[in-house]
Image (tube, helix red, strand yellow):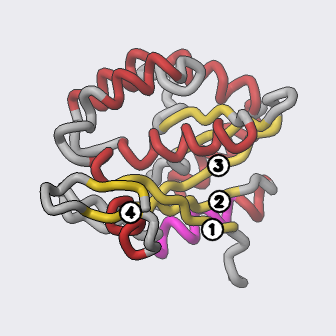
């Protein structure tokens, strides 16, 4: 197998957004309300039931929408019983033959899930591609990296179905610290900051 043909990019998020004070409540509720084409009530329910998960995928989906109006389905879109609305979209952009091939590839690589996001590009939202989202979570201390088995699975998807797969890394940063180093923010003695 040759080198994997996956595009990788990095985006940045204010680390406070991932803190338990913001995620999942009130942020997931706000994002679900602001981006109804991206997040369902079921997605919101899962974010609340699994508060240590989903932040990076949600942030990436919003990023893709803001970049070019792409619509991303977040996780588990290939499961018709558990997620019928997402599956309907998945089934509308992949033929029966393509879905069977994707299922076979998943099984071949140990029942791996498909990449985190199924992305549909404008203007017609009929051209699908996948995005695998990675990030290091300061709350759980988990560093999510692309595994060898994921790489092999994704390469098989590329080779056999010619479907684009990107990796989007979400890096959490302290924007106050960034601003201070850049000379943009000055931290006052009381902990507040002023724009320099």
The overriding secondary structure of the stretch rendered in magenta is helix
Q: Mark 1–mark 4 contact, CB under 8 Å?
A: no
Residue on which disc 4 sits:
185
Query: What x and y, as percent, mark residue 5?
Result: 72, 72
Q: CB under 8 Å between callouts 3 and 2?
A: yes
Residue 121: x, y in percent?
77, 37
Q: Read off the residue under disc 3.
A: 130
Quarter where residue 4 is shown: bottom right
For image coordinates 54% across by 59% down, the residue present is: 11
Q: Earlier in the sequence, mark 3 or mark 2?
A: 3
Q: Which residues are magenta?
A: 148-157
For disc 2, the marked residue is 166
For marks 2 and 4, the one nearer the N-term is: 2
Task: State left or right for residue 68 relative to residue 81.
Answer: right
In the rendered image, which quarter contains the N terminus?
bottom right
Marks 1 and 4 sit apart, C-alpha to C-alpha, by: 31 Å
Residue located farthest toward the right when viewing the structure as drawn = 123
The Cα–Cα distance between marks 2 and 4, rounded to whole angstroms, is 34 Å
């Amino acid at each position: 197998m040759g080198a994997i043909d996956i595009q990788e990019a990095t985006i940045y998020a204010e680390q406070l957004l991932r803190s338990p004070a913001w995620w999942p409540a009130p942020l997931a509720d706000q994002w679900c309300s602001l981006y109804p084409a991206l997040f369902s009530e079921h997605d919101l329910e899962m974010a609340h039931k699994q508060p240590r998960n989903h932040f990076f995928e949600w942030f990436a989906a919003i990023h893709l929408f803001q970049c070019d109006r792409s619509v991303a389905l977040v996780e588990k879109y290939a499961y018709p019983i558990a997620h019928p609305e997402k599956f309907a979209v998945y089934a509308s952009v992949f033929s029966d033959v393509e879905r069977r091939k994707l299922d076979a590839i998943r099984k071949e690589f140990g029942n791996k899930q498909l990449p985190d996001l199924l992305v549909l590009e404008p203007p017609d939202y009929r051209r699908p591609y996948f995005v695998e989202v990675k990030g290091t979570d300061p709350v759980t201390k988990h560093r999510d990296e692309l595994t060898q088995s994921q790489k092999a699975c994704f390469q098989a998807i590329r080779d056999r179905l010619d479907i684009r797969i990107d990796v989007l890394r979400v890096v959490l940063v302290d924007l106050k610290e960034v601003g201070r180093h850049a000379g943009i923010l000055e931290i006052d003695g009381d902990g507040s900051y002023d724009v320099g």
